[in-house]
Amino acid sequence: MKNTDTFSSFHPVISFLFFGLVLVFSMFVTHPVCVAITLGSSVAYSVYLKGRGAVRLALAGLLPLILLTALINPALNHEGATILRYLPTGNPLTLESMIYGVAAGAILAAVVSWFSCYNAVMTSDKFIYLFGRVIPAMSLVLSMSLRFIPKFNAQIKIVSNAQRCVGRDVSNGSVWQRMKNAFTILSIMLTWCLENAIDTSDSMRSRGYGLPGRTAFSIYHFDGRDKAALLYLVACGTYLIVGWANSGLRWRYFPTTKGVGAQGYPVSLYIVYAALCLMPLIIDLAADRKWASIRASVGEVKADA
């Protein structure tokens, strides 16, 4: 079951800045504690947004991704001082390469999970609102690209179900017949993609998109709540960037795993990083608690009446 996402109602600047910060930190901060924080926060927020669908994605997509990266990296990367054994090829299998493989897989999984949340929160109208006047053509292309994958997945399910009804799905017939059915579905989808692109282009051209002097309707207003959120993001981001620059989040995997531990300053950076990554979830849970309290109060009033 999906929940009502209060964070999505914030100004698009807040959403875009938040995802920009967490994605940059997720890709470049490789400290194990920070990797665990960003992966756990992204999965938790994804589960809040999408319910059981996100759980299936985490188990069927992200977990195998981490395991696959953890297995492939030691086979290709032989750096590290702690040699566990030698592979049949004669190359060493090191503990550091295995640890780095798990960390790299977790970072990749966190980025994928954050992008999944980004697609749910940063809709195409928000993206066009932010960049439509600055780079109209590029913003339209990026917006279309971001929404193409979910539209393509939905359309291919429709086509596959229709083909299954007439016995021409990829699960029907011999291997050769299944290949022919797959190519038929692919041909249908390519035609749909081209027609959809032409229709979108004609629609935007008829609306005067990109012409000088064109105005745009907007429902977004930067209010006091957005100002507080912006101050929060700037404070967290600045503190983490300064700490990162001062080696407060330093960590290396080769030749041995070594980095900052649980001293006072690094711990404060971990706490701020967790506060940044958990920001949407904290806002949503606080709003849910508030609404639950209001509904309980209304129920008591009705009962007394």
Image: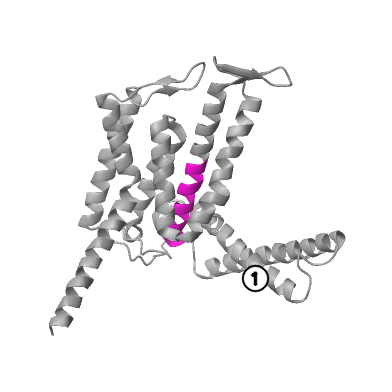
The image shows residue 214, relative to residue 61, as above or below, that is below
Q: Nearer the viewer, residue 86 or 277?
A: 86
Q: Where is residue 200? Give x, y as percent.
A: 57, 66
Residue furthest bottom in the image: 305
Q: Residue at x 54, y 66 (%)?
A: 205
Residue furthest left in the image: 304
Q: Where is residue 193? Give x, y as percent.
A: 66, 63
The image shows residue 204, relative to residue 15, as above or below, that is below
Q: Nearer the viewer, residue 135 or 257?
A: 257
**Figure quadrant of the N terminus:** bottom left
- The quadrant holding residue 272 is top left
Q: Residue at x 55, y 69 (%)?
A: 203
Residue type at mark 1? Ile
Q: Where is residue 295? Give x, y as percent.
A: 23, 72
The colour scheme is one colour
Q: Which residues are magenta?
A: 109-127
In the rendered image, residue 88 lying in the magenta stretch gets the answer no
Residue linked to disc 1: 158
> SS for tag 1?
helix
Q: Residue at x 44, y 49 (%)?
A: 43
Q: Where is residue 5? Give x, y as percent.
A: 35, 61
Q: Main SS of the magenta segment?
A: helix
